Image (tube, rainbow, N blue to C red):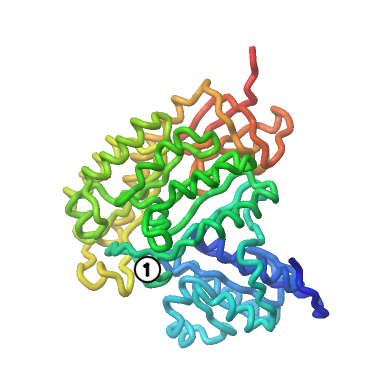
Amino acid sequence: MQVNSDKKKDFINVVTLGCSKNTVDSEVLMRQLEANNLKVLHNEDSFAAKTVIINTCGFISDAKQESIDTILQFLKAKEKGLIKRVLVIGCLSERYKKDLEKEIPDVDKYFGVNDLKDIIKYLNLNFIKDLTTERYCTTPSHYAYLKISEGCDRKCAFCAIPMIRGRHRSKSMDVLMREAEYFADRGVKELILIAQDLTSYGLDLYKRPALTDLLSKLSEFESFQWIRLHYAYPAGFPKEIIPVIKTKNNVCRYIDVPVQHASNKLLKLMRRGYSLEQFTELISHIRSEIPDVTIRTTILTGHPGEGEKEFLELLEFIERMKFERLGVFKYSEEEGTYGRDHYPDLVSEKEKSERVNEIMNLQASIYKKLNYNKINNSFKVLIDSRGGEYYIGRTEADSPEVDQEVLIPVSCGEFKTGNFYDITITDAEEYDLFGVPFRRN
């Protein structure tokens, strides 16, 4: 749907920082801008646009600093007359709006995470309700994110998301099916389900967990060859989803289940709502039902209460579990969180960084062994791009941006971005696989 407008076409550059959920928010905004006859740019480094909208992250200290640095960068361009207007939206703005208005007053306007209509009104544009299930996709055309809910009702001690994003709110299945149809019609082949908490999907709308029903419905779209799950909370994990993953050919055998720690003492301090034994039982059950599943998890180190003993427990747990994919963050003391209000942050930044490095060194050794076991085996690979002398792709075990890649020499022939190919792995490193086209004897 397009809006007829006599306005001269203008350029607006939307800069997205943070996670894939922010990406979705930017894409919703950009579709509204596009429909108002504006030329939309995304993450453009040049100053072709008169207006820059910065979608910020406010989750942890490093992300907040990146957001502030980006704001200051574009304000310098504004001061030089290279751009006319800088708007700041998103998590950082939602969380620190009053402080930002005082400390960085040269920003033309600050908006929060739920201010889409206000942004459109400020720009003197028309808000188009019919576009709420459409997006201006900033990802490669063959994959897209589907945000199935907003907010979070969990009470994790370290997390500011509930303060920023509010209570958990599921999108209805009807709305999500229309969004999915929109992507299917545009040739999207990989749909990635995201939320602050996939596990709670449907509890508010349907008074029961409904992720399994939603996944079953989405799997009926033949155009989606991969459907992937991110951010499933361990407590209350819907085990009934396992047969769907196991039996549906287009549902990836890939589940992102963040554990955060391996010490029951730390899990209790973090207010995670489950024990290490419960988490381990869950992963063992998933792996027994789906032997070739890829489990992705997240670790938080340096949390108050993590002494040497608890950190060693964590290392031993990682070594024992041998997660196929793992990310690690260091604890950041966040204003307004339970942890900030109740626990002294006794672990130094130096020690936190050292622990992050030790965890990643351990995980790198696990990756190396797992990857070497893939040599001489063939996998279905989705080509994302070409970089230098390689085509860059991913297996079913790898999500874009966060997981490893498969590198295929361009000398092997021409590969089309967004297409699937059977690739035989010929070599491996800790974070990359190398392959060539599968040859039948």
Is residue 424 placed above or below 271 in the rendered structure?
above
Q: What element carries label 1?
A: helix
Question: Which residue corresponds to the image point at 76% horizontal and 75% vertical from the top-left?
Answer: 10
Image x and y of residue 39, in percent: 75, 69
User: Which image quadrant is residue 55 in?
Assistant: bottom right
In percent of width and height, residue 245 lies at 45, 38
Residue 9 shown left or right of residue 313 in the figure: right
Closer-to-camera residue (173/298): 173
Q: Which residue in the protein does label 1 denote?
A: 162
Residue closest to the eye, 202 or 410: 202
The residue lying at 71 percent from left, 38 percent from top is 416
Q: In this view, does 358 lie above or below 47?
A: above
Q: Residues within 10 Å of mark 1 (few under 14, many from 20)?
A: some
The residue under the point 38% across, 56% down is 200
Which residue is at the front of the view, 13 or 134? 134
User: Mark 1: which amino acid?
Assistant: Pro
Q: For residue 292, which quarter of the picture?
A: top left
Q: How many labels does the image show?
A: 1
* Image coords of residue 343 (percent x, y): 20, 67
Q: Is residue 326 left or right of residue 48?
A: left
Tell me the quarter of the picture where residue 11 sits: bottom right
The C terminus, quarter of image: top right
Q: Which residue lies furthest to the front in this view?
A: 206
Of all residues, the one furthest to the top in this rendering is 441
Residue 172 location in percent, x, y?
50, 60
Q: Is residue 171 left or right of residue 441?
A: left
Classify the position of the N terminus by image quarter.
Answer: bottom right
